Image (cartoon, coloured by chain):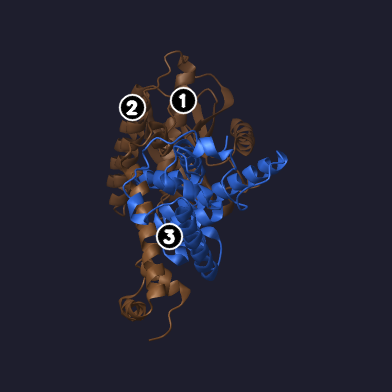
Amino acid sequence: MNSLAELLPRLRRFARALTCEAAAGDKLVENAIGHVMSRRNRQPEGVSLDNWLLSVMHKLFIGRLGRERRRTLRRKKKPETQPGAAPVRDTEGDMLGMRDLDLALFRLPGDLRELLLLVTIEELSYEDTAKILGMPTDAVIANLSRARERLRILLDEDNQPAPGTVAALSARAPLAALAVGK
Amino acid sequence: VIEPTEQDFHAAADDQLSPARLVEIQQWLASHPGDALRVSAWRSQKEALRAYFDPVLDDPVPPHLLRATEVTSTKVPMKQILAASACVLVGGAIGYGVAVASRPAVTSTIVAATSTRTAGAAGAGVSAPGASARGTIAASLARQAAIAHELYSQDVRHPVEISASDSSLLLQWLSDRLGQRVVFAQLGAFGYNLLGGRLLPGSDGAAAQFMYQGPNGIRLTLYVRNDSATPASGPGYTTEGSLGVAYWNNGALAYALTGPVLREPLMAMAVSAQAELAGK
């Protein structure tokens, strides 16, 4: 299982971007590894180890989104963002320390964020992305257009001068009390 | 030029176009500035995301995540892990020498698996100084059984040395090597049928491994070795990584039934096997 250990930095990068928070990302990676380790003799045929892990993470992430949505509804808080977004928080104070790109990603609905990250960060083919998300390739393309357009608008709203400027910022910069989910 | 689809534009931003199509799309974009702007904005977005999150790749991976990728559990003292590992190495060498068909792949697997285990246990630095002698023997039995299970249950071509069709030869041979009568338990009632068995080295001489295959190709192994020092007892249960191990003793032989199954079904099989073997 050496190859699994070698995949860890990549999985952490993806999970960090997906959950918008380092600790939640590591928790997601840990759960996905636990899932795969307990079934490691049953790797689906024709699926690489990394794609298997990504689809496990997808299922865990979707489950988390569902729980967060139900919790939000229970609290009778009106969601400010689209369904599937990360949990709604009392913004202003929390967001001050967040980097613009992180914030924009955070405000993207969870399912679109995941799809966009699979294509951009993981650089998966549209076909592999479709398999992991369990949707047709056409739907991947349509959602990819939505995700990219929405992210562009979110970045514009934040008065981001040009996407290139964002590149200078680092994901390791300390995040303000973001703490996605609890 | 065939008019580009939405997918072509994304593929242009993601470098997923075939060389021929790339030329066509580039021609199109040269004369359609609106589309060109969209594609270049997408590309910048992607580059920004990569630049923003790539530093995570260089962060040190938390030790608990690294440990989670190890097969081993960390309950057993270092000395026994080394003993078990050394023993598997010897087993690999013997198995390799004796086998009619040469299996270099298996031997290298053993070395890899052993070093992974040892490294994992060393990293965790956990020991069990307070464990009773009997608990330690059981833990060592469980570990050796689990290592042997891991090693041979995944071997597609040679999971066993002697197949179930030669079961009388198998039992005669194993009984001869262990110096006392060895039999296997019937697990057919639980859906597991005997594939065959093999001889393994153990810490106190030879050990026998019987392999069963059940629904969905799940394999169980029954590990048997001499142990007259432990009184008849069991079955007890422990886990080794993701494997469950049910173990017991009949006063002369120690048994460990191992497999990637849950506690309840494994214990039910162990109880049945112990009762059956006691009557033989």
Residue B63 can be seen in this image? yes
Same subunit, tags 3 and 1: no
Say which label, 1 or 2, has the lower sequence index: 2
Which labelled disc corresponds to residue B122? 2
Same subunit, tags 1 and 2: yes
Q: Residue at x 63, y 39 (%)?
A: B265
Quadrant of the rendered image containing residue A87: top right
Chain A colour as displayed: blue
State yes or no: discs 1 and 2 in contact (Cβ < 8 Å): no
Which residue in the protein does label 1 denote? B139
Chain B colour as displayed: brown
Q: Residue B248 placed where, x, y %? A: 55, 27
Q: Label 1 amino acid?
A: Ala
Mark 3 crowdedness (10 Å alpha carbons): few <14, some 14-19, many ≥20: some
Q: Secondary structure at mark 2?
A: helix
Q: Chain of mark 1?
A: B
Q: Is residue A14 rendered to the left or right of residue A6?
A: right
> Relative to the observer, which residue lies in front, A91 or A2?
A91
Quadrant of the rendered image containing residue B81: top left
Mark 2 crowdedness (10 Å alpha carbons): few <14, some 14-19, many ≥20: some
Is residue A22 placed above or below A3 in the rendered structure? above
Which labelled disc corresponds to residue B227? none
Q: Residue B229 placed where, x, y %? A: 46, 18
Q: Residue at x 47, y 61 (%)?
A: A148
Of marks 1 and 2, the one in the foreground = 2
What's the distance in space between the residues labelled 3 and 1, CA to CA?
46 Å
Q: Chain of mark 3?
A: A
Which residue in the protein does label 3 denote? A119
Mark 1 crowdedness (10 Å alpha carbons): few <14, some 14-19, many ≥20: many
Q: Residue A64 placed where, x, y %? A: 59, 44
